[in-house]
Amino acid sequence: MTRLSSLEINCDCGHRFKVVYYASINTFIDPDFDTSIIKEFIDGTLHDFKCENCGKIHHINMKVLINCPKGMFWVSTTESPENIKNILTNYGVLNKDGNVVDGFAERLESWLKKSPEERKKEAEDADEKIKNLRKEFFDGLKKALENSSDEEEQMNNKENNEVN
Ligand SMILES: [Zn+2]
């Protein structure tokens, strides 16, 4: 999930203030994921905070966990915009043109652009995927239950043996 954390910044001017920053970014599950987050993350401004007393900009140096359909990975906020772009492109968060492709808004937009036939096909594919996932889940559950009842039986046998 996209996670926010907070910390206190002690500015050189003596002013102390609390900021809320992105500790992790999920590019595909959060419906409120906003592609501007990724753009600001690349140019560094997502982790820039201005002291309201003297105007100094404080950049938080940290590793941010990025969660995208291809996996999870850490990106340091100290990386150059060019490096962050490369990493995000390798993970498919950005396309070749440098645009964010995993955003909910983009996915919705591309969905709306599709013909009714394409949408139907995609929905059917998704249904199939869900069916398979469900089957996998219940097969796993069945197996786990079978294994645990085996163990119980063995324990019962053991108890019986002890009684005998
Ligand atoms: Zn200050």
Image: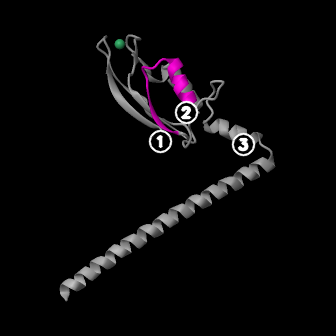
Question: Where, by quadrant of the figure, is residue 161 drawn?
Answer: bottom left
Q: Amino acid at mark 1?
A: Met
Disc 1 is placed on an element classified as: loop
Q: Which residue is mark 3?
A: 111
Quarter placement of the C terminus: bottom left
Distance Cα–Cα, label 3 vs label 1: 23 Å
Q: Amino acid at mark 3?
A: Trp
Contact between labelled residues 1 and 3, with CB atoms less than 8 Å apart: no
Q: Which residue is mark 2?
A: 91
Residue at the spot 37% in from the left edge and 75% down from the top edge: 149
Q: Nearer the viewer, mark 2 or mark 3?
A: 2
User: What percent of the width, then of the height, locates residue 21?
Assistant: 42, 29
User: What percent of the width, then of the height, locates residue 70?
Assistant: 54, 39
Disc 3 is placed on an element classified as: helix
Q: Amino acid at mark 2?
A: Tyr
Q: Nearer the viewer, mark 1 or mark 2?
A: 2
Disc 2 is placed on an element classified as: loop
Category of crowding for the residue at label 1, using alpha-carbon neighbours closer than 10 angstroms: few (below 14), some (14–19), many (at least 20): few
Category of crowding for the residue at label 3, using alpha-carbon neighbours closer than 10 angstroms: few (below 14), some (14–19), many (at least 20): some
Q: Is residue 61 above or below residue 1?
A: above
The part of the chain drawn in magenta is 71-91
First of labels 2, 3 by sequence position: 2
Question: Where, by quadrant of the figure, is residue 79 drawn?
Answer: top left
First of labels 1, 2 by sequence position: 1
User: What percent of the width, then of the height, locates residue 157?
Assistant: 28, 82
